[in-house]
Image (spheres, rainbow, N blue to C red):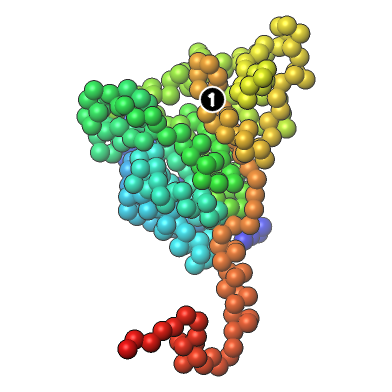
Amino acid sequence: MIDAKRPQLKPKDFASDQDVRWCPGCGDYAILKGVQKALAEIGQPPDQTVFVSGIGCAARFPYYVSTYGFHTIHGRAPAFATGIKLANPDLDVWVITGDGDGLSIGGNHMLHVLRRNVDLQILLFNNEIYGLTKGQYSPTSKQGTRTPSTPQGSVELPVLPAAFALGAAARFVARTIDTTQAHQVQVFKRAHEHKGASFVEIFQNCVVFNDATHAAFTEKTIAADNQILVEHGKPLLFGKDKDKGLVLACGALEFEVVTLGVDGVTEDDILVHDETNRSLAMMLAYMRPPALPVALGVLYCNPRPSYELDVHRQAEEAGAKAVKEADVAALLAGGRTWQVT
């Protein structure tokens, strides 16, 4: 629990004494600052906060935040984090992973931690490449990406992390960008407010092995026309002058971009974002420029009781019904048994 009498925390309270070592210009620096600022505003004490990571560039995170932390094994951070949360549900547990760690060798673990709805904040850094091991293609690499492991270009269709999370029954799915720190902080705080598995995809740039992979919607000169910041209850408008909007195409279950004032289109015609609508969230997750803008913000939020609370409740109910002096012999012979002759 947060103690109201404790002094107001500052981002520096969550900065460790370790030298931060990523490649110069890496987007991870900005994400680290965004997380530290969000933690200070959330106000959860460092000694009640845990960061868990797997393997990859992003996995260095636990060394750089002054909290408890575990640098675990490739792809298994969700499993370790689940154990931590089950052992002590009062802890504030964050999972740091990348597109390779979380969606390749760790795809199975990511699927189940989302399906189970364990109360964790899962931050997935998506730079569409394996950076730590020097630039092999990853599950999110674009088709045609040339790397040492795909010298002729990748022939695979990439995984869309937000769509994957929605398909795995995640109850909170959001997106942000490494260079938009104010938006990052807002999204991280929303993820923390949600009690259950919160999945945040962060579009992050790897300047060494996959520079500008997100430039089609992050480049400043075109960002306004290729990004849409979604907010619950507000119309899906975008563009430099907020004069473009999304509507459902006539006779088709797909989006169409319209311009306010053209052909009599008004703001009343624009779709309103409903973050509790999974189908709408899935459609938003699949949008890509140039045809449609990339959706950022909280795509989906529809809470239900979290996994660890249900597990503890079940254990308490079973304990209340237990017989004080159980008959071990009867227990062993009970149920489905057989004799070996």
- Residue denoted by label 1: 287
In this image, 133 relative to 252: left or right?
left
Say which of 147 and 155 sits in front: 155
In the displayed structure image, the side of residue 154 where residue 3 appears, left or right: right
Indicate the position of residue 221 as horizontal and vertical percent values: 50, 13
Residue 32, picture quadrant: top left
Q: Is residue 136 left or right of residue 176?
A: left
Residue drawn where x is 58% and y is 44% of the image: 172
Question: In the rendered view, would you say 96 is above or below 245?
Answer: below
Kindly state the secondary structure of the residue where label 1 is placed: loop
Q: Position of residue 198 (x, y in %)?
A: 55, 46
Q: Residue furthest top?
A: 263
- Between residue 45 and residue 330, name the one nearer to us: 330
Q: Is residue 125 above or below residue 238?
A: below
Q: Is residue 266 above or below residue 16?
A: above
Residue 255 image point, x, y percent? 61, 21
Q: Is residue 9 visible?
A: no
* Residue 209 visible, this angle: yes
Residue at 51 percent across and 36 percent down: it is 163
Furthest-front residue in view? 341
Give the residue type at disc 1.
Met
Q: Quadrant of the C terminus?
A: bottom left
Question: Badge 1, how many Cα within 10 Å: few under 14, some, many 20+?
Answer: some
Quadrant for the N terminus in the image: bottom right
